[in-house]
Image (spheres, helix red, strand yellow):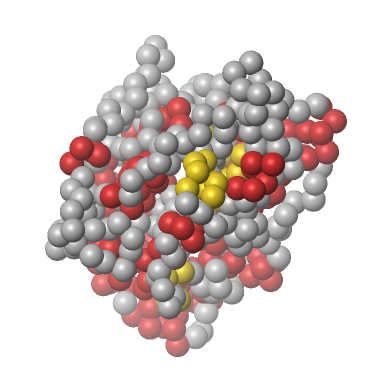
Amino acid sequence: MKLSTQKWGFAFIVTCTGLFIAIQSAILSDEARTLYKRTLDLKKNLIYYLRTFNSSRRTFNLSKPTANLSDSTDEGDNSSITGTQRGVFINKDRNLHEYNIPDWEKDITCSDASRKTVAEDLLCWKRPTFLPNYKNPCWNSSEGLRCLPYFHIIGVCKTGTTDLFQRMTQHPQILANKGVLNKETWFWAWKRYKHELFHKSRLKRAMTLEDFLDNFDSKAIKMYTVNTDEYEDFHPMVTGHGDPMDFWDQASWKMIPQNDPMMDEPVYTTPHLIKHVNPGVKLILLLRDPIERLYSNYLHGLFGRTSRQFAMHVLASISKLGQCSKTRSVRACLYTEEVIKTLKTPISASLYSIHLKEWLKVFPRKQIFIMRTEDYSKDIVGSLLKIFQFLELDALPTTKIDQISNITHFYEGKLKKSAGNILPETRKILEGLFGPFNRQLAGMLNDTRYLWLNNNKN
């Protein structure tokens, strides 16, 4: 049974009211009292925000879900949903559809009169011809051999991307890079626009594509060769990077020269740039329960230190987005730098369906490997085998895979122990907020595991 927007919205507001009362009674700080006094205004903002769910649904053609990419072979779990139950569209005959990707590159304008910004004009970069005897995309330049990444973990923050990357680089064909943690370059979403760390820190100069290429060891890729039926000197080594902000942070789109800065929303975003520069790159996306991801990111990013602060900051973030969405689309609000910089929580990154649509406009589904963090954590061996298969790398002996899977987890958050668990009232509000977006995501992936219901979180 599908609740009407009015009924669902009423239930959501009642839940919010419960949290306001809980905060007022449990916290005696001036900040909490001030927040409580703003209850009526915030309720109005939440009502406006609820209205955006309908408009955001119209952004997606859920009646034609794309092929399941939870992983390379699994068809996903659709057993608990049929037809249009709970707003998720499941194609029963599994005659799945790809999104139609337009030939957007033919519309790119490149000339000396093009708009100049702080960011390099990558849509006008003349892509070289990659060497056929290299598995990794490499070419010879005046400076010697240069290489782009073969794969890119695009997100999401606090879903286990660092742990995954560290295990992946144990494969003898995969080289790490020279970036942060030998994993992150911060190029596509941040440094090419002269900022970093959630737009809070400014750089002296913008990072260029040449700077980005410096992170990848072309000499090591060149060093190792094997004989194949086609080439006597085939180079099988590959490299990659993991920048988990790239999936969701499109807030600097006005600095892409082909976008009109006077428009409310972008035409071109990071996926367009990556597709033009590195069209064959293999993309990997880890998605975690959006509530748990948000809280982990909140603590790790030092937005706050306690579950009570988190409760207040969640409300403030929803209020900010609600205020914005009175006159603008959800996409416009999430991709506005002024909004992202002032949010009290990194809530934008958990609205997965909005961001995934951005990538599916540009890349075919078969080029994106998508997996839940919960499934990765439960079966590291199986997950790695599927990823290595997706990357078309040499199969590893069982002993090597077992060795990789038994490596100590790279990062286990300790802040949550002192911060405390998410307050029940906060969780209820976030379930109401993320629910419609999760249903969109489950429809897009044709997989009910991405609802993160109580019976399928693990």
- Residue 248 on image: x %, y %: 41, 53
- Residue 334 on image: x %, y %: 32, 58
Question: Which sits in the foreground, 311 or 180?
Answer: 180
The residue furthest front is 142
Q: Residue at x 51, y 38 (%)?
A: 137
Question: Which sits in the foreground, 94 or 315?
Answer: 94
User: In the picture provided, is 420 more to the left or to the right than 71?
Assistant: right
User: In the picture provided, is 113 more to the left or to the right than 234?
Assistant: left
- Residue 144 on image: x %, y %: 54, 50
Kindly tell me whether residue 399 is visible in this rendering: yes
Question: Which sits in the foreground, 47 or 258?
Answer: 258
- Residue 288 on image: x %, y %: 55, 46
Q: Residue at x 34, y 25 (%)?
A: 98
Look at the picture and state if 137 lies above or below 113: above
The residue furthest bottom is 30
On-image quarter of the C terminus: top right
The quadrant in which residue 151 appears is top right
Q: Residue at x 38, y 26 (%)?
A: 66
User: In the picture provided, is 146 more to the left or to the right than 397?
Assistant: left
Q: Residue at x 50, y 76 (%)?
A: 25
The quadrant in which residue 101 appears is top left
User: In the picture provided, is 11 more to the left or to the right than 103?
Assistant: right
